[in-house]
Amino acid sequence: MPHGGFFVWARLPGGADATALLAAAVGEGVSFVPGTDFYATGPDPSTLRLSFSCTRAEDIVEGVARLERAWQTLRAGPRS
């Protein structure tokens, strides 16, 4: 639970790649900024930054649900 600011940082479990998640998230109509965009050296590919500053609570709930669907898609792997 953030105590202030405009963003919340998250880390994907198991060292998953946030950039790969971003591609799936865009397919669900939601996006975020991979944390690697904010590291000068030694980027952590499993981090992501989520904005909540100008978003209604119900839109955050919907966005998290979409992000969850994207995560499940990523975890399921490519379809054969």
Image (tube, rainbow, N blue to C red):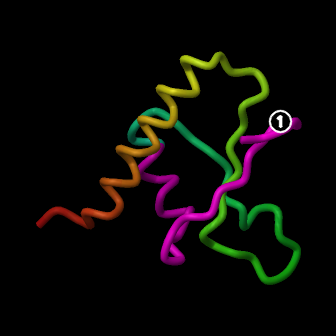
Give me the residue at 62% from left, 63% from top. 11
Quadrant assignment for the N terminus:
top right
Residue 10, magenta (yes or no)? yes
Q: Nearer the viewer, residue 9 or 3?
A: 3
Give me the residue at 69% from left, 75% from top. 44
Give me the residue at 82% from left, 62% from top. 38
Counting from the top left corner in percent of width and height, residue 65 is at: 42, 35
Give the image quarter of residue 47. Answer: bottom right
Work out which residue is located at the far bottom of the displayed protein and give it.
Answer: 42
Quadrant assignment for the C terminus:
bottom left
Q: Nearer the viewer, residue 2 or 38?
A: 2
Which region is colored magenta?
Answer: 1-25
Give the image quarter of residue 41. Answer: bottom right
Counting from the top left corner in percent of width and height, residue 63 is at: 51, 32
Relative to 73, say whether 75 is above or below.
Answer: below
Give me the residue at 63% from left, 45% from top. 32
Q: Amino acid at mark 1?
A: Phe
Residue 9, magenta (yes or no)? yes
Relative to 52, say whether 42 is above or below.
Answer: below
Q: How many marks?
A: 1
Counting from the top left corner in percent of width and height, residue 78 is at: 24, 65
Q: Secondary structure at mark 1?
A: loop
Relative to 4, say whether 45 is above or below.
Answer: below
Residue at numbered disc 1: 6
